[in-house]
């Protein structure tokens, strides 16, 4: 697709699963493999170029058990502060990369129902060229905003400055809501995330597969 190689994928996979009894979300088992691999595959198959994976809880074990080959691994020693710290670490890694990217597309490790189809649809809606560099786009599910979220490179500093605790890019997107492209993905994905033991049921059945657009 047109944006392939221009947009870097960002996978936030540092969470320690506090409400899951301290089970790191990246290492939950999905279809026989660590969940982080599924999320990584969704970003790649959806059209992202390089993928930066942010690790925190049990980072050494994630490296050992999961296939993260070809990724830029970003360690976040402050992962316990929340998603905001992981997003800041990812954007700093992108800004320092030898090969600049026009935008970053951000996915979460604990949403097995968000697959390549949603990634591809958000990328397609964001456009190319200058529009991509300054762009903002967010998947929505039944009108409710979710992930993936696309952030143009011109906005990385602003997003990093407002990313605190568990809010990630939420505050920035709220302040720039009129400039954000909303991309309905409810027909191709499920944004439910895994936070509690009851949510582990989401790992029992295959997530929605990519469909033709």
Image (tube, helix red, strand yellow):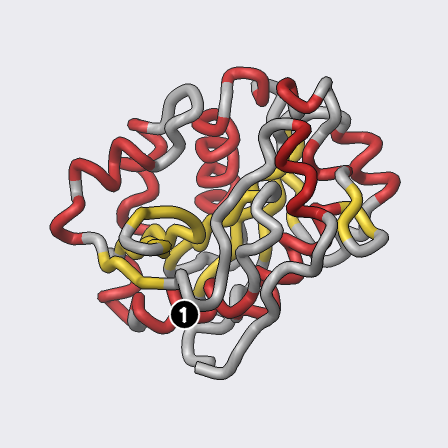
- Residue 33: image x %, image y %? 82, 51
Most foreground residue, 118 or 206: 206
Q: Of helix, strand and loop, which one carries label 1? A: helix
Q: Is residue 200 above or below residue 205?
A: above
Q: Is residue 95 above or below residue 99?
A: above
Most foreground residue, 58 or 156: 58
Q: Residue at x 64, y 18 (%)?
A: 18
- The residue where tag 1 is placed is 121
Q: Residue at x 79, y 44 (%)?
A: 29
- Residue 28: image x %, image y %? 76, 39
Rendered image quadrant of residue 79? top right
Q: Residue at x 68, y 42 (%)?
A: 201
Most foreground residue, 22 or 196: 196
- Residue 138: image x %, image y %? 33, 53
Q: Residue at x 55, y 66 (%)?
A: 116
- Residue 41: image x %, image y %? 66, 61
Q: Is residue 94 above or below residue 38?
A: above
Rendered-image quadrant of the C terminus = bottom left
Rendered image quadrant of residue 21? top right
In this rendering, would 36 be left or right of 153? right
* Mark 1 surroundings: few (<14), some (14-19) or many (≥20) residues within 10 A: some
Q: Going by the picture, which residue comes out furthest to the left?
A: 178
Tally of numbered tags: 1
Rendered image quadrant of residue 70? bottom right
Q: Is residue 187 above or below residue 149?
A: below
């Amino acid at each position: 697709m047109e944006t392939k190689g221009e947009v870097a994928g960002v996978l936030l996979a540092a969470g320690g699963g506090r409400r899951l009894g301290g089970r790191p979300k990246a290492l939950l088992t999905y279809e026989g493999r660590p969940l982080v691999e599924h999320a990584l595959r969704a970003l790649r198959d959806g059209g992202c170029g390089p993928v930066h994976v942010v690790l925190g809880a049990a980072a050494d074990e994630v490296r050992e058990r999961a296939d993260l080959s070809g990724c830029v691994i970003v360690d976040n020693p402050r992962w316990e502060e929340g998603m905001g710290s992981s997003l800041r670490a990812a954007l700093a890694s992108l800004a320092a990369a030898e090969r600049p990217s026009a935008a970053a597309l951000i996915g979460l490790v604990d949403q097995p129902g968000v697959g390549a189809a949603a990634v591809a649809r958000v990328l397609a809606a964001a456009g190319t060229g200058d529009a991509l560099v300054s762009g903002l786009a967010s998947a929505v599910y039944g009108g409710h905003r979710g992930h993936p979220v696309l952030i143009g490179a011109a906005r990385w500093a602003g997003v990093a400055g407002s990313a605190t605790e568990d809010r990630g890019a939420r505050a920035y997107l709220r302040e720039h809501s009129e400039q954000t492209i909303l991309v309905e993905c409810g027909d191709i994905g499920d944004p439910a995330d895994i936070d509690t033991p009851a949510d582990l049921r989401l790992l029992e059945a295959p997530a929605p597969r990519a469909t033709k657009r």
